[in-house]
Amino acid sequence: MTDAPQLRIPATYMRGGTSKGVFFRLQDLPAAAQVPGAARDALLMRVIGSPDPYAKHTDGMGGATSSTSKCVIIAKSTQPGHDVDYLYGQVAIDTAFVDWSGNCGNLSTAVGPFAIANGFVDPARIPQDGTVAVRVWQANIGKTIVVHVPVAGGQVQETGDFELDGVTFPAAEIVLEFVDPADEGDGGGAMFPTGHLVDDLEVPGVGTLRATMINVGIPTIFIDAAAIGYTGSELQDAINGDAQALAMFETIRAHGALRMGLIGDLAEASKRQHTPKVAFVAPPHDHVVSSGKAIATGDIDLLVRALSMGKLHHAMMGTAAVAIATAAAIPGTLVSDAAGGGARTSVRFGHPSGTLRVGAEAVQVDGRWTVARAIMSRSARVLMEGAVRVPADTLPG
């Protein structure tokens, strides 16, 4: 028997916001993986090191968390007025599948710099010093993201003094603009799939919970922290070390997904782990975050904790931050209530690693809420560039 050689595939390992992932140009992938399907999924899983029953990703580029088991495929845009198409794959850690059902807001930050560095942006648009607005088509959800990338000396500026809670070192500030981020699908409820700002969600074994279910940024189910026995200032160990709590959140997520029309039956939830997210909210109070930093009540408008891929996130998903900002701007949602109610165009919320400020302008037109854009600041940095290696027999056939 002859052992299979390894494939060498050009790639860039990047941090974007509080996530990191492996970035590929579509044309650099093996031909079988340049189209959606089993070959592409198998390749990305092998790159990350999944499925890994040890949950360590020792034999891959993943970091064994939902924030670090990600892959991105970038191509010249097929959409008029856009620079690149951005496709995001959330790779499961201990099971064999890639979830393509949503976006990663954090890694969206890195798409702009990657696009510039890899020649997807017309050089005539890149100033010697200034900012480039990279127009990104988010192919998973069919939405536009404008990534405002700082440039110095004609090159992407990566270093700077912008600090982002959840990221150890400062970097250059990148402004993300999510354009028309609500899902205006055929469900009739637009950004609120049920047509209501708050629903009574019946969850077997848990009870009937008041829930705000919103589809903007990423489908998200918001519930009151107090209703499930939490304060809203919990850190990862308080949730991720509690198997009973994780099972409860997954049950809430599955029943919420069904109520939102994202799945046809509860069994489908296990194959759609990336969406929807479950988050719990609470009014602000003094607390300490994972770095040991003290956050005072007056520093934030509310507290939010969110789960991603079955675990409490160490900070906050960028897409969920868009959902938080939008829900906070709409009086009557659980998020708005936790923030004190009333109309607002921005919100600063507390998460396990610190705080984050996000802006969103929501308006009601003919009884339907819409949001034109949501804006937040993140940062991004190239960690390594070159090539990844995977055994050639990774690809089916």
Image (cartoon, rainbow, N blue to C red):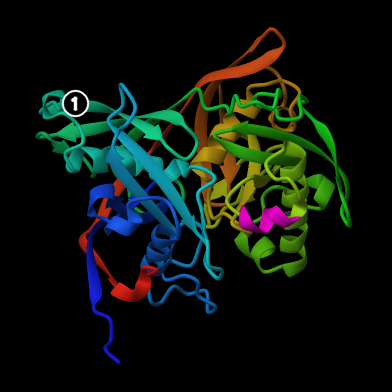
Res. 31 image quadrant: bottom left
Q: Residues within 10 Å of mark 1 (few under 14, many from 20)?
A: some
Res. 184 image quadrant: top right
Res. 186 image quadrant: top right
Location of the N terminus by quadrant is: bottom left
What residue is drawn where x is 27% and y is 33%?
Answer: 149
Asked if residue 121 lies in the magenta stretch, the reply is no
Task: Report the side of 29 relative to 280 (left or right).
Answer: left
Task: Report the side of 15 relative to 45 (left or right).
Answer: left
Asked if residue 271 lies in the magenta stretch, the reply is yes
Secondary-structure class at tag 1: strand
Q: Main secondary structure of the magenta part?
A: helix
Task: Report the side of 164 relative to 383 (left or right).
Answer: right
Task: Tell me if I can see residue 207 in this picture.
Answer: yes
Magenta region: 267-272
What residue is drawn where x is 21% and y is 36%?
Answer: 120
Task: Tell me if I can see residue 164 in this picture.
Answer: no
What residue is drawn where x is 24% and y is 32%?
Answer: 150
Judging by the rendered image, the residue that carries numbered circle 1 is 130
Residue 100 x, y percent position in the rendering: 50, 49
Location of the C terminus by quadrant is: bottom left
Residue 260 x, y percent position in the rendering: 72, 37
